[in-house]
């Protein structure tokens, strides 16, 4: 070897023509994200057990749910800045090990403050995943397949929510509230060790069109990266809409298991399964449809991904309203399924739409900032619903969040129109 040649630092993926590994990367990250969401959802299905074990009020339970979001949001900008500068593989797998250990530690909680602490630390670990993983996927998949790749990856969010909510409820009913945390914590650590041998880093911007000007980030300081995002009007609009959509999702994820148990008389296991299965299962279908449709529409119309999101928000509105008003289980299942499908249309393009309006050298920091502000804004929702439920009931409070979706639908349609003007 010529001693003057530079020593390679990164372990690069196969050449551009090898698309098989590019999709294998999506599959590997799918399982990481599965545990990302299973671990965060698991606690909600055992809220009734925690309420009894630690003598907690609904407001205290809401704070447990929000504590994750507060730290998750606060760590988002740092996670994005780091994701644009260091190995994304290290961030993804290091985060997986960290949050899995915290999930395991949650089982050893003996006081209410312990639950708050471990939920907060879980938010810290999970904050580093999305900025790094979305950046990595975008480098393996260019504009032609990006929505589809991200949509497939997004389906793991729903699968993980189903797994965490259902398994935690079933395990909690038969083996106690701690059992789910043992299972998910240990399984996540094993997965991280396996992927250490399989997942590879890749040069940034490799799969972008050759006509797109290369952008590097050798000397850009932290403040420049942050200010550049907030100076981008399209990014700010997408982030504002993301806050509203996240708020509605946070309400359903946090309170639906308890709502089904108290208002429909379901067992702990049945409430955990039904609160997640129907909505998240149909979200998988919706996200795949949304990814395929958006990739095709984006070829023909500037802002096509955003129009797909607008459709999902508008069509999801009546199903949210129905979910909180009905007293029929079959109608409730249909309402949650409909909401889940159209939520998937929106979710499929959250990051792909953002990547349409931000430079490739700031992808991770853009995801980090949008994720941070989105979850910070949504963190008040579980607490707000706990308060309004005490005044008006949980069902009407859940139903009222449908108005958020309706407003967001028109805001997203206007953003898509503005996107056309920028092209």
Image (tube, rainbow, N blue to C red):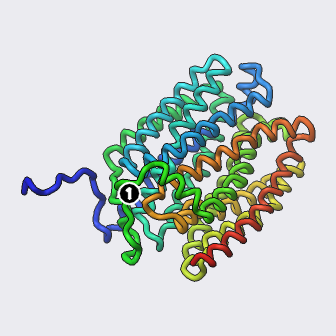
> Toward which corner of the image does residue 39 lie, by quadrant?
top right
Against 418, is 328 above or below?
above
Q: Please report the residue visible at 49 percent of the width from the left and 34 percent of the height from the top.
A: 100
Label 1 environment density (alpha carbons within 10 Å; few <14, some 14–19, many ≥20): few
Is 155 in front, or is 269? 155
Q: Is residue 202 left or right of residue 292?
A: left
Reading the image, the residue beneath label 1 is 217
Outermost residue toward the top in this view: 110
Would residue 282 be visible to someone looking at this image?
no
> Toward which corner of the image does residue 195 lie, by quadrant?
top left
Residue 178 location, x and y as percent? Answer: 60, 25
Q: Is residue 248 left or right of residue 106?
A: right
Residue 106 location, x and y as percent? Answer: 57, 26
Residue 361 location, x and y as percent? Answer: 43, 60
Q: Is residue 199 left or right of residue 120?
A: left
Is 49 in front, or is 131? 131
> Toward which corner of the image does residue 412 lie, by quadrant?
bottom right
Outermost residue toward the left in this view: 2
Q: Please report the residue visible at 40 percent of the width from the left and 62 percent of the height from the top.
A: 139
Quadrant containing the N terminus in the rendered view: bottom left
User: Dot 1 lies on which element?
Assistant: loop
Q: Please report the residue visible at 41 percent of the width from the left and 42 percent of the height from the top.
A: 93
Residue 413 location, x and y as percent? Answer: 71, 71
Tally of numbered discs: 1
Outermost residue toward the right in this view: 392
Against 130, is 47 above or below?
above
Quadrant containing the C terminus in the rendered view: bottom right
Would residue 109 be visible to someone looking at this image?
yes
Is 231 in front, or is 53? 231
Q: Please report the residue visible at 47 percent of the width from the left and 70 percent of the height from the top.
A: 145
């Amino acid at each position: 070897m010529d001693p003057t040649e530079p020593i390679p630092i990164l372990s690069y993926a196969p050449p551009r023509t090898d698309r098989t590994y590019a999709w294998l990367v999506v599959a590997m990250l799918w399982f990481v994200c599965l545990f990302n969401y299973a671990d965060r959802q698991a606690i909600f299905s055992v809220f009734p057990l925690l309420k009894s074990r630690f003598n907690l009020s609904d407001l205290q339970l809401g704070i447990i749910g929000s504590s994750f979001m507060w730290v998750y949001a606060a760590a988002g900008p740092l996670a994005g800045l780091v994701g644009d500068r260091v190995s994304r593989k290290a961030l993804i797998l290091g985060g997986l090990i960290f949050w899995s250990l915290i999930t395991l530690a949650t089982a050893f909680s003996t006081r209410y403050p312990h639950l708050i602490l471990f939920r907060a630390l879980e938010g810290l670990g999970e904050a580093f995943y999305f900025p790094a993983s979305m950046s990595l996927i975008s480098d393996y998949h260019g504009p032609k397949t990006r929505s589809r790749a991200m949509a497939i990856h997004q389906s793991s969010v729903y699968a993980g929510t189903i797994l965490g909510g259902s398994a935690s409820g079933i395990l909690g009913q038969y083996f106690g509230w701690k059992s789910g945390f043992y299972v998910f914590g240990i399984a996540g650590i094993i997965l991280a060790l396996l992927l250490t041998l399989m997942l590879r880093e890749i040069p940034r911007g490799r799969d972008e069109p050759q006509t797109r000007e290369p952008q590097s980030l050798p000397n850009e300081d932290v403040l420049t990266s942050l200010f550049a995002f907030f100076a981008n009007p399209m990014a700010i609009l997408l982030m504002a809409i993301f806050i509203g959509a996240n708020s509605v999702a946070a309400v359903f994820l946090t309170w639906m298991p308890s709502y089904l148990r108290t208002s429909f008389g379901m067992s702990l296991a049945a409430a955990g399964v039904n609160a997640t299965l129907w909505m998240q299962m149909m979200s998988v279908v919706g996200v795949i449809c949304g990814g395929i449709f958006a990739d095709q529409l984006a070829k023909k119309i500037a802002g096509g991904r955003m129009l797909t999101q607008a459709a999902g928000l508008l069509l999801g509105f009546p199903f949210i309203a129905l979910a909180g008003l009905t007293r029929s289980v079959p109608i409730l299942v249909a309402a949650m399924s409909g909401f889940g499908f159209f939520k998937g249309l929106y979710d499929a393009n959250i990051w792909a739409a953002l990547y349409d309006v931000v430079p490739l050298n700031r992808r991770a920091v853009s995801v980090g900032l949008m994720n941070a502000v989105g979850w910070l804004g949504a963190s008040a929702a579980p607490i707000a619903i706990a308060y309004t439920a005490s005044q008006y009931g949980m069902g009407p409070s859940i139903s009222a969040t449908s108005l958020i979706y309706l407003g967001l639908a028109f805001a997203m349609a206007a953003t898509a129109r503005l996107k056309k003007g920028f092209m």
